[in-house]
Amino acid sequence: MMRLGVLTRVRAAATAALSARGVAVFATAASASTLALGMIGHPEPALCKASTSPVNWYKLRTDLLELIDSDTAQNPGVDGASNGGGGAIGPMLVRLAWHCAGTYDVKSGTGGSDGATMRFKPESEHGGNAGLHHARALLEPLKRAHPNVTYADLYVYAGVLAIEACGGPNVGFRPGRSDAAKPAAPEVDKRFSPDGRLPNADAGDAGKDKTATHIRSIFYRMGFNDQEIVALSGAHALGRCHTDRSGYWGPWTRAETTLSNEYFREMIENTWTVKKTHEGKQWAGPLQYEDPTGELMMLPSDMALIWDPKFRPFVDKYAADEALFFKDFAKAFKKLLELGVDFK
């Protein structure tokens, strides 16, 4: 049984905060069934039982869950959050998997999670990947302990398990990704991609039409529709922004280690204004929005989801129905993680 670590303590604080609003952190049977506080009874993926596999998936799963729940694993940062200032490990691993996969271009067939190309420059230094070297470094000991797993599968599997450990749905995982041996141009190796393929937080209009158009251009390029865009954006229920990475500051919800529909509820039920100050001083970072307490934030790209008339109906649906959000998120996230992968 896994010891009760940082996820437990952070979730306890989040539960108290959300209870004050009449919100249950584990609002659905889907959330409760994962039993994130220790993962007792968590359903084992079928692949974990495959004794003929060169990877001991069951042991790797156990090791990853211990890392996700660790309060000593370091995620260095300057904002005073847990695990060295950068916050809990689980949300960072979700971001790692997302950013590995989110480079795919359906027309050229380049990018995606195959190859684990973020290990190499220049992709490792792309602005959208700031801070993810901490996630990759935390996974290195597991790669050494499980040498037969590819980096590409390890990064994705870590993100899938982090979703479930944080109370989210069982996304499912299909192994079979390869590792690139060295950096290459996309014209030479389609697993690689240029900079600029990940979404920006603002297209220069504080979350209005240009930002909505930018979001669509990024996600349509991968083959997603508006409903899937909103569902995938729900991952912002996890984690926080960092002033030493993106320049933005703060969590989206008061339960940053719990995947729920609270992100959508906060978006439509709270009041959001442009952030002017931070810790008693004038805010010097990029334009973002904050709630009346100044403790929660939304990016311009988040606000675009409620201001755009085609995105908004999905925000409302997910705010009202967490089970629907979980179902749609799991489907869209699995699709994202498998884009461009030639499973053999």
Image (cartoon, rainbow, N blue to C red):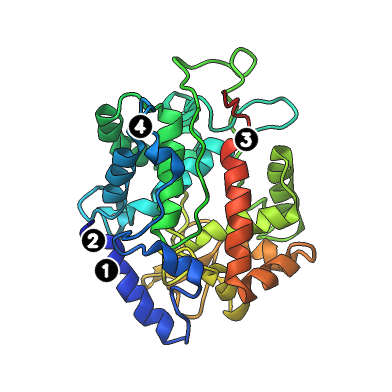
Badge 1 or badge 4: first in the primary sequence: 1
The answer to whether residue 129 is left or right of residue 14 is right
Instruction: Report helix, strand or loop for mark 2.
Output: loop
Question: Which residue occupies 31% across, 68% down?
Answer: 10
How much space separates mark 2 and mark 3, taking CA atoms?
34 Å
Mark 3 surroundings: few (<14), some (14-19) or many (≥20) residues within 10 A: many
Q: Amino acid at mark 3?
A: Leu
- In terms of image quadrants, where is residue 18? bottom left
Question: Where residue 339 is drawn, which disc sits there?
Answer: 3
Q: Amino acid at mark 2?
A: Gly
Badge 4 or badge 2: first in the primary sequence: 2
Residue 17 image point, x, y percent? 38, 80
Mark 4 surroundings: few (<14), some (14-19) or many (≥20) residues within 10 A: few
Confirm or deny contact between disc 1 and disc 2 (CB under 8 A): yes
- In terms of image quadrants, where is residue 185? top right
Quadrant where the C terminus sits is top right
Confirm or deny contact between disc 2 and disc 3 (CB under 8 A): no
How much space separates mark 1 and mark 2, taking CA atoms?
7 Å
Residue nearest the observer in this picture, 126 or 107 = 107
| Residue identifier under label 4 | 51
Instruction: Report helix, strand or loop for mark 4.
Output: loop
| Residue identifier under label 1 | 9
| Residue identifier under label 2 | 5
Q: Amino acid at mark 4?
A: Ser
